[in-house]
Each structure stands twice: as structure tokens, then as C-alpha cells.
Amino acid sequence: MRSRLPLLAIFPVTVLTLVLGTPFVLGNHPVRFESGSALPRIVIGDDKDPATPSGHAGGTASASAPSGSPSSAASLQVAKPWKKGMAQWGVQLYWEEEKRKRSDTFIENQARKHAKYLIGLGANSVSVSFPFFIQNSTSDTLSAGAKTPSPERLQRVLKVFRDAGFRITVRPILDEGTLKQNNGWRGDIEPASRSAWFASYKQFLTPYLRAAHNAKANTFVIGTELNSLEGDPGWEPLVSYAEKNFSGEVSYNANWDKYVVGRINMPVSHLGVDAYFPVKAPDTAPVSTLVKGWNTWLNRKATGPLPNILVSETGIGAMNGAYHAPGDFYAKRAVNPRVQANWYKAVCQVVQDRRMQGVYWWSLWFDDDPNTPPDDKVASRLDFAGRPLSEAAIKSCFTSDYAGPGTAPTT
């Protein structure tokens, strides 16, 4: 497995500092951000709003995966296809084009390989994330780059998942490579001209909205972790434009810190939360302690069921000390698979207990082989493919009795 720097849900330095230090001093108080002044058409996630539903060696996933080659149609069918009201059991599949552009045949076969692996886990959903780029934190111009898959190639990959029966989310996400030199992240950008930024963003998104529409994707994520731009009036016309050009639902994915402290001012009807809640617990903590930690965070927003909320991205490193900062994508401490597996079990229990819409685990990398155990000398600790304990936890979650927020609870 190749070495790489992860790109999604990276904490800003200020958040990292407070997350790592604050839990020990102030008891896990979240970082507070001011929301935008403009009122949205719909406010999602405010606690005053009514809650209306809207085969590799040693691995457990491959042990029950259907037999046949990746191109075999019989091996590429979701056991229980997603329907409205059901839980979304999924994975974030992150796709960067390589320096040496792969052939269309390669990417289709790679998509089939991932589809077969996900079917073995019991997944019914997949979210395909890919990067777009900005020059710096004040730039008005957004664009595709060499690592951005073309709309045509994206549509080819989406078709593989559609034919296999997956629920599909399309999620373009702002790459942070040009922001790192100033310790920046996507949630802190301040375009010199917001109107120009939104115009540029619309131009970039248009062909991807069409590709998602043509592939019959279920969800298009209009923005991810853009804290500083939430509440801007520029979202209203952009979301309306997206809804006219894409037949599925238009969603927004909020960062966990912003979600727990206030309103997510976005004119969308569907909200996901990229959730990396730190929990002050030792590596030996039982699952129940981790569940309590998650509920403590969620209860700062609202208690009880959360049928409108989707855990759109979450994960944790399979290493010592990860509970204190699950979103630390860069650390490579001693490998501890049980830390990751127990975290997955806890998150799944919370999703079910709070009757949430589902969960998407971070992550699979598109060019990687999910059937190959990770090389811990170079691989991200957040990789779960090839870790038997983590795969077993995911499969247990995805094949549980929880049907979803739109169904009656089991007794």
C-alpha cells in the first residue's frame, strides 16, 4: 500500500490543540465557531427544530463475500438494497487520479473490486469523494486539478456501483494541500469575493451534477466542512441550481465541532456530520465507555433520537491513544487494532440507539486493493481494510437488526 497524506476531516491546528488539551482540562468542551449572519431557507440541526424523519487472508469481510471474479455480475449484487427509510450502511471511497492516468478499464475493474469487498461487509451504500482545488485561503477561483477525476470517468465508476445495487453519494471536497503551508484547512477559507467564489464553484460543480444525475446517484453533497462559509446567502441560489440539475437529494456535511455548538445554517433538507468526537478514555476502555463519550457530545446539541442526522464520515486510527483525538490523520503510534474495532462498535451502537440515518466509515482509497492488509510502515492508521477485528465490527454493524430511522424499532 502506497504512502499518502490523508485529506479529509483534518482538524485545523487550533482545533487540534484544543481537542488534545481541552478534554483533560475542561472536560471535552467543543471549540466554538460563530455562524453566518444570513438566515437560511431551512435550518438543520438546531435543537429547537422539530425532529421529522426525512477476500483477503484473515479478514472477516471476504470470508462471506460472494464468489467469482470482480467482473462477475453474480458477485456484484447488494444483498439488501437500500430503500427510503432504511439505514445507510456505507464507506467513504476516496478517489484521486494518479500521476499516470489509469485506463477506463482499470477504473471500472477497480470499482468492481471495491464493490465486491463492500458487499462482503454487508454495505448497502457508498460515498465517492474526490478533490477539487483552490490556490490559497483567500482565492476566489476553484478548479479541477490533475488529481480530480473527470465527470465522464466519475460516471463510469458510479455506474458500476449503481448496477450492483448500492445507494450512491457523490461528494466533491476541497483539497487542503495549498492551505497547509499556513496551517489552514477548508473550514477557515475567506474568499476575497464570496460572490466570485460561488460563481466559480457553480461552474466547477455543473458537470459533476450532470454526471451524478445521469448515474442516478441518490445524494450530491454540495459542501463539506466549510465552517467559515456556512450561512452565506450565496448558498441559496447554488442549492436551488443543484436541485434543478440533479434529481436526488442535495446535502451538506458539517464538521463535528460546528454541529455540536449551534445551528448549521445551510439551505438544505439533508445533513451529514463528519464526526470525530474525542473521548477521554484509556486504550482498554470498554465499548460502553466510548458510547457514553459520544452521547455526551451529541447531547450538547439535542437529546434523544436524531432521525435527521447521518454520520457522513467517521473513523479512528488503529493505534494507541487514538480515543483522545480520533481525527488525527497523521500520527503513527503503536498499532492497536482493538482500539479501532471497539470504536466502530461504539459508533454503530450510538447510530442505532439514537435512530440516526446511518454511518459512512473513513475510508477506502480508490487505487488501493482492499484485499491486501495494510503495510503499517507507510499506511494510514485509519485504514481498516485488512484489519480482521475492524472488518468484523463493521460487518456486525451492517448486518444488525437496525433497519433505519424510518422503520419501527425492534423490541
Image (cartoon, helix red, strand yellow):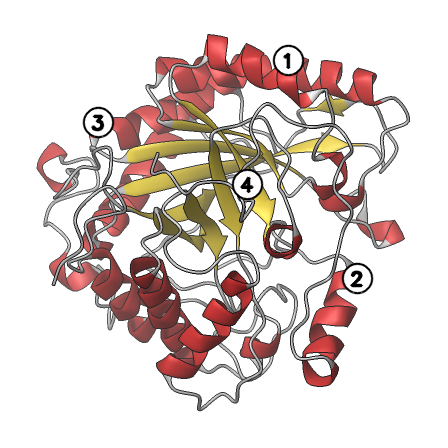
Describe the element under mark 3 as helix, strand or loop. Answer: helix
Residue 92 position in % (x across, y down): 44, 46
Left or right of 26 in this view: 351? left
* CA gap, disc 2 and disc 4: 20 Å
Left or right of 357 in this view: 80? left
Question: Which residue type does callout 2 highlight?
Answer: Val
Q: How crowded is mark 2: few (under 14 residues within 10 Å), some or many (20 or more)?
A: some
Label 1 sits on residue: 237
Describe the element under mark 2 as helix, strand or loop. Answer: helix
Describe the element under mark 1 as helix, strand or loop. Answer: helix
Q: Nearer the viewer, mark 2 or mark 4?
A: 4
Q: How crowded is mark 4: few (under 14 residues within 10 Å), some or many (20 or more)?
A: many
Question: Which residue type does callout 1 highlight?
Answer: Pro
Q: Quick one: label 1 or label 2, which is nearer the N terminus?
A: 2
Whether pointer 2 and pointer 3 mark residues with C-beta atoms closer than 8 Å, the reply is: no
* CA gap, disc 1 and disc 2: 32 Å
**To which quarter of the image does residue 101 belong?**
top right
- Res. 13 mark: 2
Q: How crowded is mark 1: few (under 14 residues within 10 Å), some or many (20 or more)?
A: few
**To which quarter of the image does residue 300 belong?**
bottom right
Left or right of 59 in this view: 266? right
Left or right of 88 in this view: 315? right
Which residue occupies 22% across, 65% down? 396
Describe the element under mark 4 as helix, strand or loop. Answer: strand
Residue 182 position in % (x across, y down): 88, 51
Whether pointer 1 and pointer 2 mark residues with C-beta atoms closer than 8 Å, the reply is: no
Relative to 287, residue 19 above or below: above
Label 4 sits on residue: 253
Relative to 298, residue 19 above or below: below
